[in-house]
Amino acid sequence: MAKLKITLTKSPIGASPKQRKVVEALGLKKMHHSVELEDSPATRGAINKVSHLLTVEEI
């Protein structure tokens, strides 16, 4: 399966509490922190919820 590199590029401070929980569930802790996750429908759904805060690259 493909992998995705997800980077938090904008602060979730002004985001709703649900969106903050999604960012935390993706494993992102600070600004410019990156994680590598498997490309799955669940991951894509979480990314779509907070896409305005993230940068996503395929690896």
Image: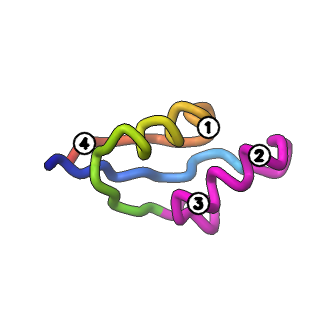
**Numbered disc in front, either 4 or 3:** 3
Return the disc, 1 or 4, that comes first in the chain's sequence: 1
Residue 25, disc: 3
Identify the residue at horizontal 17%, vertical 47% (top origin): 2
Residue 15 among magenta residues? yes
Label 4 sits on what residue type? Glu
Between 10 and 24, the one nearer to me in the picture: 24
Q: Sort mark 1 into few (<14), some (14-19) or many (20+) by Cα contacts within 10 Å.
A: some
Write down the quadrant of residue 34 in the picture.
Answer: bottom left
Comes first in the chain, label 4 or label 2 = 2
According to the picture, the residue beneath numbered tag 2 turns out to be: 18
- In this picture, residue 41 sits left or right of residue 31: left
What distance separates the C-alpha of mark 1 from that of mark 3?
Answer: 11 Å
User: What's the residue type where badge 1 is placed?
Assistant: Val
C-alpha span from label 1 to label 4: 17 Å
Residue 58 is labelled as 4
Please report the residue visible at 52 percent of the width from the left and 57 percent of the height from the top: 26
* Magenta segment boundaries in residue numbering: 12-33
Residue 25 higher or lower than 56, as above or below: below
Q: Nearer the viewer, residue 11 or 38?
A: 38
Earlier along the polypeptide chain: callout 4 or callout 3?
3
